[in-house]
Image (cartoon, helix red, strand yellow):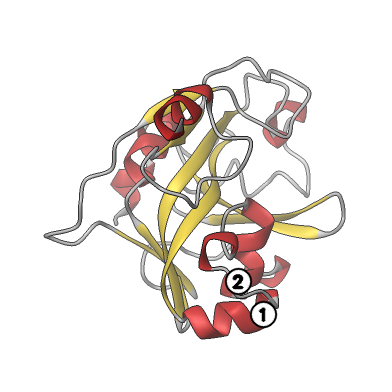
Amino acid sequence: MTRDFYERSVHEVARELVGCTVRHGATAGRIVEVESYHEEEPACHAFVGLTSRTRVLFGPPGRAYVYHSYGIHALLNAVAENEGVGAAVLIRALEPVDGIDLMRERRRIENVNELCNGPGKLTQALGIGLDLNDTSLLGDGPIEILPPENGDRPPELIASERIGITKAADLPWRFSDPRSRNVSRPWPKAMRAVRA
């Protein structure tokens, strides 16, 4: 995954991240759900402009933007678009593929479908904290995002409204693979129809 991959529309990057793998140390998971955020809409941290907190969002694409949600959970984002534009993709859910026992130990649960089915859960499972903010995702940092391997099943994609926010919640910038049980709840309406 090169800088060019991230140096495009945040929505294109978001859609193409589904099916890729996030690896940190001995743990890894396949991305099954993401959300895109752009400085032009009020749910994005970059909407307020350049601050000490948001500077990573305006920096080079292909960096990790890790922040605390409600002062509790670390959330992992991949910075996208051109430098100077505030945009990032929130990694919302993963299917665990490596280091599952370590994930279970960190999360203190057994059910594999519950290990990474939310943005705060996946960072806990993978051991990703605020200390990894502004690190490279391009293979030369502690967190790697790897393209799908030959033979991996291509993801199906559905777009739906983002969740867990109160501003600009109507934008259809949540992208999920409806075949995965690891997508966070509430499941998108299209996915609920598939499950019924």
- The x and y percentages for residue 167 are 75, 21
Between the residue at mark 1 and the residue at mark 2, the CA separation in whole angstroms equals: 6 Å
Judged from the image, the secondary structure of the residue bearing numbered disc 2 is: helix
For the point 29% across and 57% down, which residue is it? Answer: 1
Whether residue 128 is visible here, answered yes or no, is no
Q: Vertical placement of 144 versus 94: above or below?
A: below
For the point 68% across and 31% down, which residue is it? Answer: 44
* Residue at which label 1 appears: 106
Whether residue 29 is visible here, answered yes or no, is yes
> In the visual, does 28 lie left or right of 16?
right
- The x and y percentages for residue 120 are 68, 57
Q: Amino acid at mark 1?
A: Arg
Q: Nearer the viewer, residue 15 or 107?
A: 107
> In the visual, does 23 lie left or right of 64?
left
> In the visual, does 133 lie left or right of 178?
right
* Quadrant in which residue 157 is drawn: top left
Pick whichever of labels 1 and 2 is earlier in the sequence: 1
Question: Residue at the right extreme?
Answer: 71
Q: Amino acid at mark 2?
A: Ala
Q: Nearer the viewer, residue 41 or 118?
A: 118
Judged from the image, the secondary structure of the residue bearing numbered disc 1 is: helix
* Quadrant in which residue 28 is drawn: bottom left
Q: Vertical placement of 51 versus 26: above or below?
A: above
For the point 54% across and 40% down, which residue is it? Answer: 88
Q: Residues within 10 Å of mark 2 (few under 14, many from 20)?
A: many
- The x and y percentages for residue 21 are 36, 61
Question: Residue at the top extreme?
Answer: 170
Q: Vertical placement of 36 versus 142: above or below?
A: above
- The x and y percentages for residue 119 are 63, 52
* Residue at which label 2 appears: 125
Q: Are marks 1 and 2 in contact (CB under 8 Å)?
A: yes
* Quadrant in which residue 76 is drawn: bottom right
